[in-house]
Image (cartoon, coloured by chain):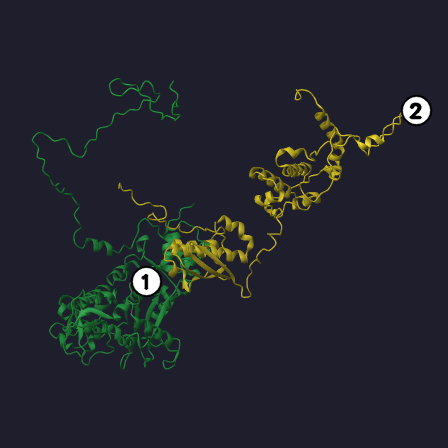
Amino acid sequence: MAWQRPSCIVQAMQSARRSAQPLLQSSSVSPSLSPIPTYLFARQRTSTRSYATEAKPEAKKHEPPKAQQAFAAAQEIDFSVFSNRPARIVPASPAYFSGNPKFTDGLLEMERLLAKYESLPTVVPSEAPQMAWLKLPQFREFLGEHVPARKFKVLLSTLQRLNQIDPALAPQEVRTKLNSFLRPGNPYADKPVPPVVDELGRARAKGKRKTSSAVVYLVEGEGEFMVNGKSLLETFPRIHDRESATWPLRCVQRLDKYNVWATVKGGGVTGQAEAITLAVARALLIHEPALKPLLRKAGVVTVDARQVERKKPGHRKARKSPQWVKR
Amino acid sequence: MVPSFCGTCLSRLRPTPRVLPSLTSAPRAAPFHTTAVLSSVLMKKKNRDAPAKKYRERTAFRMKKKRHVERPRPPPAGERQALRKRIVLSNPNALEVKDMKDLSADTMIEARLRGSVLGLPMPMLDQLRASGAFKPHQGWAIFRRPGTVMRSETLEMGKNFHEITSEGAGKGKVFKRIISGVRASGKTVHLLQAMTMAFAKKWVVFTVPEAQDLVIGHTTYTPISGTNPTLYAQADATAALLSRVINSNRDVLSGLTVSREHPSLRSTVKPGMKLTELATVGTTDRAIAWTVFQALWTELTATSPAPSLEKHFQPRPPILVTVDGLAHWMKNTEYRTPEFQPIHAHDLAFVNHFLSLLKPGFEKPSLPNGGALVYALSTSNKPSVYALDVALKQLEARQAGVDPKSPEFPQPDPYANADIRVIDALNVPKPKDAKEGALEVQTLGGLTREETRGYMEYFARSGIMREKVSEESVSEKWTLAAGGVIGELEKLGKRVRVAA
């Protein structure tokens, strides 16, 4: 029965949709600070809930006077006042039924912007302005919606692509939209002060490897290398260790341009040598920051943070189990 | 098809390998259940270790017979040592370095040869071998012929040797050095260079290639009667020294004759005898080796003939004495007195003689005809003698002009029980004779960059280093060798590099 034929409910919905049309259009262009706006109808906010079957008091006002004139022109339609009031709350966004309406709207908005400005020139990711995007938990809290991680990733890639638009040419619209996705506070603002060469021409840097830690003073010189007040040979009898300690200077042909004065403690011979490697590389970057890509390629910028895995109870070593004995 | 689910208990049945059901062996599945057929034929446990017993074989426990393993026979006695101590001076596979000069009387003073590698003269190699100048593991075996770098210290020594021999103010001077330096810094090769220069200048060379050999109790020793405190003569070691002297200085010594009476050797030694013959007396009769050595030393340090024996006197050449591993002479030896007290190294007549040369001579210089004492320390084979460390510091301080009475002068720790004999032995007063130099400590460091470059070029030209010798590669090796320590440079130079 009632399911099979169009009923008054369906008609009411259609009329509601019609009446909502102008408002929907206006909502899409209205500016807002929030990235994902949601709107209720202005009238619905103020008026109480009403039904299509209810008697309308305003309709009576416009009723033509009976039997005064046999033929009278119809009254001018006042378009400011709708003949049909919406029967119930209707979502502002078509994404209302998608589960994550705010998110979906925001994503669509960003995609619209991307489509609009896709032709603008871009810069490489490393030169794009550094942005601290909202993290997923923060984003969920911000929206109040459970955004799946996969979808969030899609949004992030869109944001990153928009961020890559050449900063000189990026439209204000894009920048403001992008800024609304930033974490509160500015994590990239309070950077540590980059170390500098002191008044005696020394660059000081630390390095760690395994359980060794090294402090290196690097000055311009002619290739002298002192470790703990001893020569390199006395500290590292093995050639390999000497090579590791001098590698950052060697790989950029600076071995005869600097003197190294290092102190290193803790750990074993290899650890000490490689702690010096890291410290020398960092000290060299203070003198010549432009060497960073080369040094990174040489593998002396990345910290090797591995430590000895602890021994576990019930094991002979970290992983080794005791031999299995039958009873 | 049998369903994989059991219809009654709804459990998943294990898939089994499909085998043709044999009517006899496998039990058939119960007809009312859909369980897959599982083979329940159990393997019978077999005792695999025990072989099947044969008929009437004994069952008692039998011990396994030990199998005799054929082992290769060990090499004959002495062969391993000979192999270990073998000195190879040439490598026919190495390229010959063109226009390589020899270390000679002319080239040893040429300052522009600094940093270049000079070959040791081929005719002199036998002399050098006889005097124990080469040691194994010095890397001679990788080059076509032995050669050494002319470093600044070498050139300075060459200049000194030249002055001592040539007519002039420096003629007949004595200079005394203790060579120290880090491991593999070229101390022993410095001695070798000194010997080469001395041979080139026709000096007489006395060498002690291994000071340790005298104190580890490996040679005979006898107390010398009439000495107080008792000194001990080492007959075999002295004979070995004499034979080294004969073999390496045969030309010079055969031109010199005994020029005075030697009452203790009256029966065998006569004036007019060649000095080689005198020395041979000591090598043949070891019992009198020490007396013969003393006689030889008296002859070589004579400045004038004994009266009435003028016809047998020829002017004596300067003497070079080299000792390697001096620190071993600064402590108690492995020898014992009859009371079983340890004998101090300074109580050995041999050691005492060479150490006393460091002190200025009484009335005339310790080497009256001039010459040099070059004693090297060793770092790889070094007994720790606290007194020696202090004595060397004192020597350095004295060299730097620190007054021995000033508080800056290094003093031994009063609680460290420093050996006072060692400090006294190196506490050398300023010599009265102008010709006699004061005892000095010379510390060998690394090569300079220019010298390093010359050395590396020698490797490249010998075909050992397959690498371009450039400013960069040289400075890299110089730093890796901790400022050009030559032994480390050699390791870096001969290392095969695989291009990654």
* Residue on which the image places disc 1: B189
Q: Amino acid at mark 1?
A: Val
Element type where label 1 sits in the image: helix
| Residue B310 against residue B20 in the figure, above or below | below
- Residue A80 is drawn in which quadrant? top right
**The colour assigned to chain A within the rendered structure:** yellow
Q: CA distance from mark 1 to mark 2?
A: 137 Å
Q: Label 2 neighbourhood size at 10 Å, few (<14), some (14-19), many (20+)? A: few
> Depth check: B282 or B327 in front?
B327
Q: Would you call the spot at circle 1 few (<14 residues within 10 Å), some (14-19), or many (20 or more)?
A: some
What chain letter is assigned to the residue under label 1? B
Name the quadrant containing residue B118.
bottom left
Q: Nearer the viewer, residue A168 or A141?
A: A141
Q: Position of residue B53 (x, y in %)?
A: 12, 31
Residue depicted at x 50% and y 48%? A297
Q: Quadrant of the C terminus of chain B?
A: top left
Q: Amino acid at mark 2?
A: Gln
Give the green chain's letter.
Answer: B
Please, which residue is most extreme toward the right here? A69
